[in-house]
Image (tube, grey):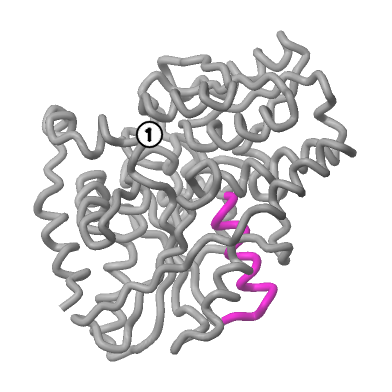
Amino acid sequence: MEAIRRIEADYNRSADTHLIRVDLPRYPGITLYLKDESSHPTGSLKHRLARSLFLYALCNGWIGPDTCVIESSSGSTAVSEAYFAKMLGLRFIAVVPASTAAPKLDAIRFHGGEIHMVDDPRTVYDVSNALAAETGGHYLDQFTYAERATDWRGNNNIAESIFAQMSAEEYPVPDWIVCGAGTGGTSATIGRYIAYQRHGTRLCVADPVHSVFHRHFADRQALSLPEGCGSCIEGIGRPRVEPSFIPSVIDRMIAVEDAASIGAMRALSARLGRRVGGSTGTNLIACATLIAEMAAAGERGSIVTLLCDGGERYGCTYYDDAWLEARGIDWRPHAAQMAAMLASA
């Protein structure tokens, strides 16, 4: 099929994302690595997911040459899906919360996508289904299909890439891999791959404190938050347990306050000399907890986490001090703590 050939050809033209080593002089024998997913053509980890979702839908016969494609997203997935829809000459509609950062909306439009905003983020599912019925199109539904669209056994998924890039390091099998959860697809892929390859690595998922995922991990009866997800960290955390979230493959979850995520994001940006996104800060806070525990136990080893996206799309939010102050987010103490951990000397 021509559409599949185009997607595969695009993949063949792309290099793997870089694995950045971050030495931690304050913690001898422990090294942190950042899997830099911001280098994808559409700038985020969601590029992998979008490619998998399109291939999954095409191979299932759900998308044809005239199909209108719809997705519910907080932004980054829709940016990547708009890219692939444009590649295939398909109409694409992104159903997004009204709070989505403006640069993400601009990126969706840049790739030819249309925006359908909703005031209540909890309605994105029903609105997306309604648009699919109205247009005769297909709702990609990342929240349902993320965990099954990616081949977790290999085929260059993110877990296989991490272990291949770690193979020549001092501690090639990470003690921990840390990621966030938006759909749950990434944690499902990594957790299953670890089990399949029989690695000793443990999987930790960092989750905004106002998300339902860590509550469900602790109590399987906790399925939703009636008040919604109050986190301002885009791309992770949900008000309901999504079908793609598989808690049984996760070893630990750490709940993270938004202020801590923003502070860690700012500190890491200063260390790297370029901006990263908020969900990377969430991951980093969980890494800091694990690093401190390893050091206290006298353990040596490596931890890998994901640099999910760049910070360019958050200039009017997470990097705007006035925006943060208006929301009562006191990030500076957390930035100072993280800067001390990341200090290069």
> Crowdedness of circle 1 by 10 Å Cα count: few (<14), some, many (20+)?
many
Image quadrant of residue 329? top left
Quarter of the image where the N terminus is located:
top right
Closer to the camera, 245 or 175? 175
Q: Is residue 72 left or right of residue 219?
A: right
Indicate the amino acid at tag 1.
Cys
Q: Is residue 191 left or right of residue 19?
A: right
Q: Is residue 227 visible?
A: no
Task: Check the image and report above or below for 159 versus 265.
Answer: below
Q: Is residue 104 magenta?
A: no
Q: Is residue 192 magenta?
A: yes
On the image, the x and y values in percent for residue 171 come to: 45, 87
Q: Is residue 54 left or right of residue 224?
A: right
On the image, the x and y values in percent for residue 269 come to: 26, 54
Closer to the camera, 132 or 243? 132
Q: Is residue 300 visible?
A: yes
Give the prevailing secondary structure in the magenta stretch.
helix
Q: Which residue is label 1 attached to? A: 229
**Residue numbers of the magenta segment:** 185-199
On the image, the x and y values in percent for residue 188 come to: 60, 57
Closer to the camera, 105 or 336? 105
At horizontal 77% and vertical 42% (from top left) the residue drawn is: 56
At horizontal 47% and vertical 85% (from top left) the residue drawn is: 169
